[in-house]
Image: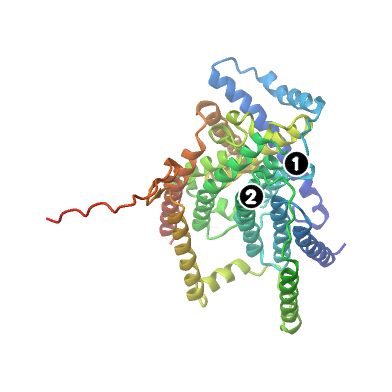
Amino acid sequence: MSRSLLVDLAFYILSAGAVVSAWLVFRTDSMVRAAYWLLVSFVAVGGVLVLLSAEFLGLVLVLMMAGEMTIMAVFMVMFMMNPAGLNPMTMVHQHRAAVGAGLVAFAGLAGVGLVADFPDRAAPSDAPATAELGTELLGDSMLVFETAGVTLLATMIGAIAIASRRGRYGDADAGSLPPELEAPAPKARA
Amino acid sequence: MSGAATWWLAPLALGAALAGGVYLTAVLDRLVARAVAGVPLGVPDALVAPARGAALLLLSPPAATERPDAQSWALAPALLAAVAAAGTAAIPLGPGLAVADVPDGIVLFGAAMALVMVAVFLHGWSANSAMPLLGGYRFVAQALSYEMPLALVLIAVALPAQSLAVGDIVVAQEHIWNVVRQPLGLPIFLVTAAGLGFWGPLALPDAADVAGGTSVEAAGSALLAWRAARAAVLVAAAAMAAAAFLGGWLGPVLPGPVWMVAKTAAVLVAISAAGHLLARVRLERFVVVAWTVLIPLALVDVFASGILAL
């Protein structure tokens, strides 16, 4: 088999895998399984990115999503009073709103797919895609990405401050006490 | 091994290398345990003991729990072995002698090792049993803590090489190994490697204080597969330590692949000795140390390496 035929075959298998596993996210009845079907979908998309000679983006997608889907599963289980996440529960709610949102999103993305002017020249397989990406990130687009990066960092610091063990009413793991009803007497000023 | 006629050799070579590595890990761990205990080494016995243990597990019956997620439970060991194989594929045994010495090899290794968390959590979660579930949750906290230092020290070794390919990183150590050039790198990497393979002081998800953790309900061939996959992750991490910090295939007299195997074995001995000499740490303490000590040290490592590489 020729190389381009193998690449085409891999593309169709990965694309079908991404679509089918994304569909299974809504067909399963478990929070953990739903999260990991979504991870399978992301891994397949990462594979398509690798086929497009964007290996760095594809691998980073897998790297980030592996941790994020696990965190998402653990958070869903914590919020849902279902300590193991193994009890079956339906994963779809508010059918009408969900169908509407799904149709709007599909129409929007399909419209972009039909209208957009995609480049049709084949990328050379030895193109220095990672180096070009780095030049773009720290060159022309630096302001955009640094702004986004600093915003995300500030959000993370805020989240850590909120989740910190030391809070207004003492250590979180020591059990908190309600504040006193009467304000403590103000200290005499010298 | 990228020739048109030999592409099918690559998976076979990778499988053979990992199987050999898993066997080597089992033998070395037994020898190190005896050396630490001060009893005679008994090399011939240590050479056959892994096969004896494997045969015993293969012949013992599988275990069942009430309503497990059977597919995920069966998948977890296979996933763990697959990510170990994917990570190992990027590491060359000699110049140009890798299954896939891709331009982004370090990132491939990192992406594969990020999936270790998924495999261990699935293994603990899918048995539908309390202790494995605790082990799975433990590993999520453990993995989130070691992943940042791991990623940072790997970024630091890529800086002097000006490349993310593992082969280029080895070549960049021709004059001075990274273990000397970046003294913080290898110690931090070894801690994260023990965390990756949940080994020794960081064997928290499968620890005795949760009755065996994620593997307590596994038995027979499933338990054998889980242990072998875990050893394969450790082999991948040790091979990466050898390539990224100890000069990979570089060395006098002997051919390159021999040096690479010897260095990987030396790292395996170090990690195994840590398991027999150090007590298991508490998860809370490890998480605090990882976020408040290891990550700042790894950042210092990155900044210092960046300044040196300029």
Looking at the image, residue B159 sits to the left or right of residue A132; the answer is: left
B230 or A134: nearer the viewer: B230
For the C terminus of chain B, which image quadrant? bottom left
Report the residue that reaches farthest toward the top: B40
Secondary structure found at label 2 = helix
Secondary structure found at label 1 = helix
Looking at the image, residue A95 sits to the left or right of residue A133; the answer is: right
Dot 2, how many residues are within 10 Å of its Cα: few (below 14), some (14-19), or many (20+)? some
Q: At 46% from the left edge and 67% from the top edge, which residue is drawn?
A: A150
What label does residue A77 carry, if any? 2
Above or below — where is A38 with respect to B286?
below
In this view of the protein, can residue B258 be seen by the observer? Answer: no
Q: Residue B176: percent from the left, percent from the top?
A: 47, 48
Above or below — where is A113 with respect to B208?
below
In this view of the protein, can residue A9 be seen by the observer? Answer: yes
Report the residue that reaches farthest toward the right: A1
Q: What chain does mark 1 sit on?
A: B
User: CA gap, disc 1 to disc 2?
Assistant: 19 Å
B11 or A140: nearer the viewer: A140
A143 or A136: nearer the viewer: A143
| Residue pointed to by mark 1 | B73
Q: Residue A16: percent from the left, percent from the top?
A: 81, 63
What label does residue B36 carry, if any? none
| Amino acid tagged 1 | Trp
